[in-house]
Structures are given as C-alpha cells and as structure tokens.
Image (tube, rainbow, N blue to C red):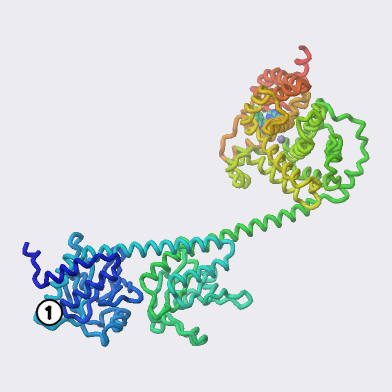
Amino acid sequence: MSTMKLHVSDPASLLKLCSTLHDKNSVEIQIKVNKYLQEQTEASLVFLVPLFLESEEAVIQVLGTKQLEREMRFPVTNNALNVAVKRRCSIASPSRDLNRDLQDMIRTVISPVPDTFLNVPVPHPKQGTIALLVCIVNYADRENAEFICSELVLECFRFCLGTVLNTVAYEEEKRLKKQCQSLLSVARNLFSRLGNMSDLLREIMTEARKLTNAERCSLFLVDHDHNELVAKVFDGELSNQAVKEVRLSINQGIAGHVAATGELLNIRNAYSHPLFYRGIDEATGFRTRNLLCFPIRKEDVVIGVAELCNKNSGYCFDVFDEEVAMAFSIYCGISIMHSIVYKNIQDAQLRSKVSNELMMYHMKVSDDDVRRVSNCQLDHTKIQIDNFSFSPRMILLTDTPCFVLRMLDDLGLIQHFRIKREPLIRFIMFVKKGYRDTPYHNWMHAFSVTHFAYVLIKNLNLIDQGYITQLDALALMISCACHDLDHRGTTNAFQMQSCTVLASLYSSEGSVMERHHLSQTLCILNTEHCNFLDCLSPEQYSKCLDLIRDMILATDLAQHIRIFAEQQEMLNDGYDKNNEKHKRLLLSLLMTCSDLSDQTKDWKTSKKIAEMIYEEFFKQGDMEKSMGNNPLEMMDRDKARIPELQIQFLSDIVIPVFQLLAQLFPPAKCLVEATEINLQCWSRATNIFLERWPKGHSSMEILTDPDFEKEVLELLNFL
Ligand code: 7OP
Ligand code: ZN
C-alpha cells in the first residue's frame, strides 16, 4: 500500500482541491486543477489536454486560469504531444514541436513562449490508456524538478481524474448532441428546397458558412463528361446565368485536387500550399488565409466540391469543422441527388404532357367529322333499338357515334343537363378513336355495353322509379362507353407479369387496366372542346367524375367477385332507394351486367363473342409462351377446352349476375333465361368439340367451323 502514500503532495491542499471540484462544467474544474498544479509546481502555466481515444483528438479549453475564446481541437497523431502518449512517461519537449496554433495560443498567455515544456501523461487506472496530458511550462528550477512535477500531477489525478474525465465526457456528449441537432435542422432546411436546385445550392453554402463560421464559400459541381468543375455559387452569390459559367479543369487547384481524390483538405496557410492559386486573390484584392475544402459525394462518386474560405475571428478551421463538414457533405450529396431526380421527374412529366398534347392534336376529330354526326341523315325511327334482344353489334361501325347520341337523347339526358351537342359528339368520337383494333376489347364492345346500359335504364324505368338519378344515368352511359379505353388485349395479370409501364403505374392499387381506362377517360374529357360536362354545376361535375371512377373500376371482374356477396346481401335485405351504399352497389351491378351482356343474346352471338375472346386470350397465351411463361389453360390455344370454359364462365359468373338483377327487377328474368339457353348450347357443344379435338383440329378451328354452329343449333331444336 506504499503507493497510496503521497510522496510530494501536501495532503491538505490536495484535499482542499478535491472538496471544490463539484462544478458541472469542465472549464471551472480545469481552472481549479491548473491553479493547484501551478502553485504546487511553481510553474507559470499549467494546462490539461484531455484525449478522446476513439477520435484520436485532443481538446484544449483552458490555459492556466484562462478559458480560451474558442476551444482548440486537433489530432494527437501528428503532434509533439503524441510522443508522451506513445512513451507513456513524462517528457520535456521543445515548444517549437507544438502546433503553430497552440504556440500562438500560448503566446497570448506567456510571451515569449519558453523553449521547453514538460509533458506528463496521465494513464487511466482501469483502461491502461492515456486519459489526458498535463503540460507544465516554466516550472520551478529545483533538483529532480521533472520527477517532482510528474509525481505532483500523478498524485493529484489519483483523486481528481474521475471528476475531470466525467465532466469533459459530459460536455463532449452535449456538444455532439448540439451538433446532431444543428445538422438535423440543416437537413430539414435543405430537404425542403429540393424543388429548386439553385435555391438549394445557395442554401447549402449559407448553411456551410454558418456551421463552420467561414467568411466566404464557393461550390463547384463536377461535370464528369468534360472533366471540369463548374462554379455554381461564388462567395455566397449564385453565379448569374447571363455571366459566362466559370469552369475549371478537374486537375487544377485545391478544389480540383479534392474532386479528384475525394478527400477533405484543411489548409491552414493558403499561400504556403503548393496547390493554391493566387491569381484570384490578386484579381479581387481579397486575401485568402485558410481554406476548408470538402467533397460532396453520391455514393462513391464525387459530384461536387465545397470550398470554405477564411475562418472568422482569425483562427483556422479545426478538427471540429472538418467533422461537421464531412457530416454536412453527406446531406448535401443526398439533397443534390434528390433535387436532380426531382427535376428529371418533373421534366419527364412535362415532356409526356407535351407529347400527349401533340398526339391529341393529331388524333383531332375534325369539325367535318363532328358535323357529319350532327347532321346525320339516318332515319332513327326505322329500327327499334330499345329492347333487350336487340343486337347492337349489327349497327354499322360508322353509325355508332350517332346511336350513342340518340340513346342519350332518348333518355332525356341531353335535354335535362342542357348538354352541348358539339363537344359531346367530339368526345364520343375521341372515345371511339381511343379504342385499339383488338379482337374483343374494341370500340364495338364498348358500344354494345353502352347500348345495354341504355336498355336497362329505359326498360327497367330506373330513373322514373327513382332507382338512379339522371346524373347517375349520365355517368353510367359515359362509363360504359369509356370503360375499356386503350385496352391492349391483355389482362391485368399479364401487365403485372411482364412488368409493363401500366403495371408500374398502377399495380400497387390493383385493377391495373381499369385504372388506365379511367385515366384515358379523364384525359379525353380534359381535351380542348371535348368537355361536354362543363354544363354541370361544380358539385354535379365532381360527383359525376366520382361515379365514373367507381363504375369503371367496377368492370374489373375481380372487383365484381369481391362485392358480389354484398350485392346479394343488399337484395336479400331489400333494396333501399335512399341508401347511398345500395345505389353504388346497384350501379356496379348494372356495369357488370352491361359488360357481360353479349352472353344474353342469341347463340350465334354467344359463339361469335367466344371466338373473339379466345382469339384475344390465345394471342396473350402465345406471347406468354414466347416470354418463357406458362399461360393459363384458358389462354393456351393447345389446351383450352372452350365449351367447358364457357359453361363454367356462364354458370359461375354470368347467370348469377343476371339472377341478382332479376331478383330486383322481374322483367330482367328474360336475360337469365336467354343466358341459360346459351349454357345449354355450350353443353351440347362440349361433345361435338371433344369428338373433333383428338382428330388434330385446333380448338379455334372447331369453333369457327360453320358446321359446328349449325350442329349445336340442330341439337337444341330437337328439344
Ligand atoms: N363473354 C365471355 C368474357 C368468355 C361477355 C374479359 C374473364 C373470366 C373467367 C372466362 C372465365 C373469362 C374471364 C366476356 C363475355 C371478358 C370475361 C374478362 C370475358 N366468354 N369470356 N367472356 N373475362 O377474365 F372463365 F376477358 F374481359
Ligand atoms: Zn368490357
């Protein structure tokens, strides 16, 4: 226990010191310790250098009894102090081996700076590392002076080390917390300016100057194509577009070096640095003293360089500034990249808008086309189109716009809403053009669906009986006409599987194609001279668009299957005309019925529709095969047993839908019956089909063989 005995210290003074170390402030504590050690060693100056081992940094806050205006941080690695740390014993070093800054600082307390000073390392009793250094300047000249000083220090810190280290660590934590907070608020500031690149760059420099207390700043972006640096912000002023851009070669000067190496440069004396270019100072009369130049990266690539010039208040940039600059540069990199991405997205959006305008312009429906429809010479009373058994597909393609007009007229909608004919006709003709030439999902399909909705509204007296309003009826008719706009003859599953543009736009919300049909509808509606809905009040207009949205999305069979149970429940509980939810379910049901209405026509139609649908399905199946995917059996021309698939489709989906309709509207029973006849036909067809199939006929050949249709009909007539 002899080590516990004090060799040189005066126990009373040391105890007195210990009893006063209760401040929560490392400066106060260091002043007291320094003062004690100055008295005991009779030195003119004692100061402590606490070490942060993780960061290999030293920090000096107090010289003797004087608190520095600004704490000094520097790396211990390249320093005279490091010798004592490495050797772990007291050592007298020449003062000139100290940092220039530190020498300057000491000069403010003792001038001239003495030649040597004693450096005493204090080890951490548990960790075995050096916790701090004590520097003793001008100590009493006595025998064994160095030994006595070291002993005084070690004995002192045997009691005070914990207090000193803990307060220093506590303040370091506080400093880091503050640094984090200020970086966070910088990040918030930067990230709110992503929409405007020049605004962002200016703000980056303002923040960088604020954080490091620099006098001036410049920012360069790297132009990798030309190996050049482009000056974006000079001295806090955004470079004017009118003034020619300032460009530097990437291997020129300090900024070029930083861009090339990606490493931060902290230059304490600009004029003695070989890379420094005096030309600018000479031209501007500005005097550059010191520089902190750091890279801004996107991942590993340097995309920019920031140059901070002249630390205010006469100091140099220190380790603290370097640290902040590196953290800050990460935010700069992220915000610059995001700003670029944001700009690209905005540009892409604008370009797509412009090209859409161009397309719309060329797709333009001429005034002549519109006039032809509005002056239609057809005798519309000659054919009666308003019954369930009428086949809209027998109407000539060129006459269809006129018939849409006639249906809307007949429902009293044009008159009721005072719809202007010209934009309405133009809208209808745009919609017609918006369909592709696919086997099934083409304009004739949309037209026949629209016709069926018309027959439903008219024959079931939906408006007069208060089931739906005129606005609902209008939205229903528009939805039918538009519900498959720009269909590509492929399913939702196909879009997802082959990662089409449409899938990337809409797959997260489901009903990929239906969302596209809706988007196309709104696009046409917003085209010049097409918005025939501007006669609606704003409330009616937005309600109408909501209805259109719901109804187009309802044409996804997956959506129908989701809400089928709700529709059943609604009809079992009794339909309530005043219930908004009931009305929505009814409108969805009307859409589904209209979309599937082909199957309520005669057998010839049912079979013809199957031909079209399987032609489309098989084309998709072929594409899937060529992409190395396995199509559904239904889409595979070598596997699809069409009659069986039709039986399944009619009995599982179509008949239940029309049964629901007939449950609410008894006159619709005929639709169920007509579909059931087709079901029977497909039943008969199964045998004929299976007979021919093994003989090498493809499923499509069998279906399109005229004898097939006849044979099925004959079998039916036998009944
Ligand atoms: N008749 C039809 C369709 C066969 C009027 C569609 C499907 C689902 C299950 C078959 C099946 C097809 C589907 C409409 C009409 C149109 C139904 C969506 C289809 N006869 N199909 N078919 N459909 O996905 F067993 F392709 F748009
Ligand atoms: Zn459809």
Asked which quadrant contains residue 20, the reply is bottom left
Q: Quarter holding the C terminus?
A: top right
Find residue 642 and report its image quarter: top right
Give, as a three-letter code, the residue at label 1.
Answer: Ala
Do we see residue 610 in this rendering? no
Quarter of the picture containing the N terminus is: bottom left
- Asked whether residue 392 is in view, the answer is yes
In terms of image quadrants, where is residue 584?
top right
Q: Residues within 10 Å of mark 1 (few under 14, many from 20)?
A: few
Report the image quarter containing ligand 2. Answer: top right
Rendering coords of residue 206 (x, y %): 50, 71
Q: Give the residue at x 87% y 51%.
A: 367
Residue lying farthest to the left in this orientation: 2
Secondary structure beneath label 1: helix
Residue 17 pos. (x, y %):
19, 69
Residue at 78% from the left image edge and 16% from the top image edge: 714
Q: Residue furthest top?
A: 719
Q: Nearer the viewer, residue 625 or 476?
A: 476
List x then y, in percent, for residue 268.
38, 79
Residue position for label 1: 145
Left or right of residue 361: residue 55: left
Task: State left or right for residue 387 relative to residue 597.
Answer: right
In this picture, residue 404 sits left or right of residue 206: right
Q: Which residue is depicted at the point 15% across and 73% down?
A: 150
Along the line of sight, the residue nearer the viewer: 473 or 221:
473
Number of numbered labels in the structure image? 1
Q: Nearer the viewer, residue 312 or 676?
A: 312
Q: Is residue 70 left or right of residue 484?
A: left
Q: Identify whether 439 is placed above or below 248.
A: above
Q: Position of residue 345 (x, y in %)?
A: 60, 57
